[in-house]
Image: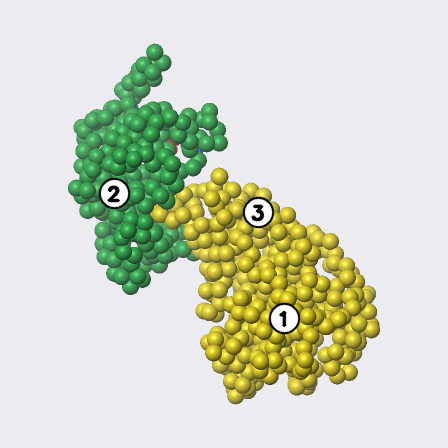
Chain colours: A green, B yellow
Amino acid sequence: MLEVKDLHVCVEEDPSEKILKGVNLTIGKGEIHAIMGPNGSGKSTLSKVVAGHEAYEVTQGDILFEGESILDLDPDERAHKGLFLAFQYPVEVPGVTNKTLLRQAYNTIAKEQGREELDPIEFEDYINERLNVVDMKPEFLDRSVNAGFSGGEKKRNEIFQMAVLNPKLSFLDETDSGLDIDALKIVANGINQIADEEKSVVMVTHYQRILDYIQPDHVHVMLDGKVVKSGDKDLALKLEEQGYDWLTDLASVSVNGEQN
Amino acid sequence: MSETEALESMVGGEYKYGFTTDVEYEDFPTGINEDIIREISRRKNEPEWVTEFRLEAFEKWKQMEEPDWPNVEYETPDFDKVQYYSATKKKNKNKPESLDDVDPEIIETYKKLGIPLEEQKQLQGIAVDAVFDSESIFTTFKEKLAEAGVIFCSISEAIQDHPELVKEYLGSVVPKGDNFYAALNSAVFSDGSFVYVPKDTVCPMELSTYFRINNMQSGQFERTLIICEDNSQVSYLEGCTAPMFQENQLHAAVVELVALENAEIKYSTIQNWYSGDEEGQGGIFNFVTKRGHCRGDNSKISWTQVETGSAITWKYPSVIMQGDGSIGEFFSVAVTNNRQQADTGTKMIHVGKNTKSTIISKGISAGKSNNSYRGQVKISPRADGAQNYSVCDSMLIGQTCGAHTFPYIESANPTAKVEHEASTSRVGEDQIFYLQQRGMDEDDAISLIVNGFCKEVLKELPMEFAVEADKLLGIKLEGSVG
Ligand SMILES: Nc1ncnc2c1ncn2[C@@H]1O[C@H](COP(=O)(O)OP(=O)(O)O)[C@@H](O)[C@H]1O
Ligand SMILES: [Mg+2]
């Protein structure tokens, strides 16, 4: 589904600011991955670069989606291919209702994928049914996108958008943070419903608590712009108990390794 | 191309109304003096009192100086080079009774502008007065309106056919010597619309005037007067476009609205005059005085404007709330791009008790433009319980434009409540990235953001025109992004 190969990324405006320093990652169809790591290790940057954010420049390496490089594609073209990013900080769009945004988004993607667009009445039925996935109230459809939403509501809204747009691969950037335990369960339950045999999900998080509700097939640890360790769910538990310190050596070893 | 550049080039959508119509004009000298004013009056076959009105205004104008307080910079027009009267040559001097008497070129022009005048194709539910340069060319649905007792015609016709009404109200809201450009207008006003809605009448259709400046040399000095008697209602819309010329054209209009007891006037404008090229060459100078007078108790006047054109805009639609319980509203979207400069806002004058006003202003600036909101709320000592609520929001696109807010609040009554909110935001890369991630291209993303920003104002427009305004913002924002 997705292959990130030796990805080096710096900040477009300041090329001396290197953020990703050789990330390798392979996500298979239908798999659930978790990427963990301390603040500032590059998790959000990786998610945004995969989605095509123009503030970053790829200086080395490649990103393949279903076998083809997507580096030259605009963010909307990547979205048309079935890529979705649930934002760590969802953006407010005052005056534009959730429903308006989603109908335009859904129909644009449907059109690009050669599927049938939905008229307002069909869309109304569809979107109302999708509300159930994250147990959201219909009132949210007519509210401006994220404007005046609480932190938790914004996160839930991201998963709702994912449920409506039905992407092949989703990066969920810290969707779990800012949620109370009930909301966390609802969101986790929603993600589990969407992630089926065909769909892949990458959860970016630095807490293991969401992994109590969603079983990842693979867990990766990022430190200082690299994936330093991969493993299964037990790795997440070990991180929870021991923190990241025992891995810092690993990071410097591999950095040294590169220099040799 | 960076996103900021992309944004900037997008707002520079091409002007689609810049063509000229080839018509023959009557000869008329340029410049302004007493003889010229008498000649305008003579050609329009006006009664003596109108000539006097013009001459008195001219006397006042000569004593006045151009205001320099607006936050705009331009070279003062050379008033001797302007042509103050412009009429196309016709066989028959009178206003055409049927379309057969109208120059087909002009009919074609309006068709191109999306305003078909032919009976079969007329816009449903909207009566249109088509003003070409200084003349009203044709008014549709006149008979149907007459059945309801509503008078809708050009002001020139009204002077001929309903002199008693015009005499009573002309200059009663905006006095001859009100300000520099209002005085100039009062001296040389060309044409414009006249609306009279009698007592207890809801005007059966939307009224609309479409202003077109075609003549390069002529200024346009439109004069509009709308009177709504007790318990009556009317909704009126003006649209404006002009060809693209290298030189600046002067447009100095005066609009007066009078609402008597329980009457309601809704006045909407979609202003899309040519705004000059990227370097700031050409474009319309739009210096306008618009004022409404809530004369009767519980009357209501509402201004809605979508301002996208003109090189310089200088315009403050105002409401004097004299009647107790009367209401004034101002809803505005002003978009500036390239080197456009706009200084626009409103004045809400509370005189009567329990009067209420609302101001919602949305300014969008892009390119190297400058967009200022200037609003005055004035509460007189006897306006017990007066209330004002103002919001002015500015949105910046790119790094080289400016937005300014100048609110003036004067309250002489301690029981009055005045609330003012202001905000400035920038269309951010993150907002666009978010929408693009959801599948929309840059054009659509910006359109959506801008539309959301203006929504509170756009929803005030009559249905038929909301679509028009939406399209216009679309064009203004449409991408030349490669
Ligand atoms: N646009 C940017 N400009 C400058 N520095 C950035 C930018 N984006 C991210 N960074 C820096 O890159 C590092 C990684 O950030 P981020 O990817 O947000 O980490 P995480 O999501 O793992 O907490 C941080 O040090 C952050 O300050
Ligand atoms: Mg992050």
Q: Gap in Å between the C-alphas at discs 2 and 1?
A: 57 Å
Residue positioned 43% across, 42% down in the render: B430
Q: Mark 2 points at which residue?
A: A168
**Inter-mark Cα distance, 1 to 3:** 31 Å
Q: Please provide percent x and percent y for residue B215.
A: 67, 65
Q: Between B410 and B446, which is closer to the camera in this rendering? A: B446
Residue A195 placement: quadrant: top left
In which image quadrant can residue A244 be found? top left
Residues at circles 2 and 1 in contact by the CB criterion of under 8 Å:
no
Quadrant where the N terminus of chain A is found in the figure: top left
Q: Element under label 1? A: strand
Q: Quadrant of residue B314?
A: bottom right
The residue located at (74%, 56%) in the rendering is: B76
Q: Name the residue under label 3.
A: B367
Residue found at x 78% / y 75% = B39
| Residue A19 drawn at (x, y percent) | 39, 27
Mark 1 sits on what residue? B132
Mark 1 C-beta to ligand 1 under 8 Å = no
Q: Mark 3–mark 2 contact, CB under 8 Å? A: no
Residue that sits furthest to the top in the current view: A260
Taking the image as shown, residue B224 lies to the left or right of residue A208, namely right
Look at discs 1 and 3 and give the one toward the viewer: 1
Residue B325 appears in view: no
Q: Distance between the residues labelled 3 and 2?
A: 39 Å
Of marks 2 and 1, the one in the foreground: 1
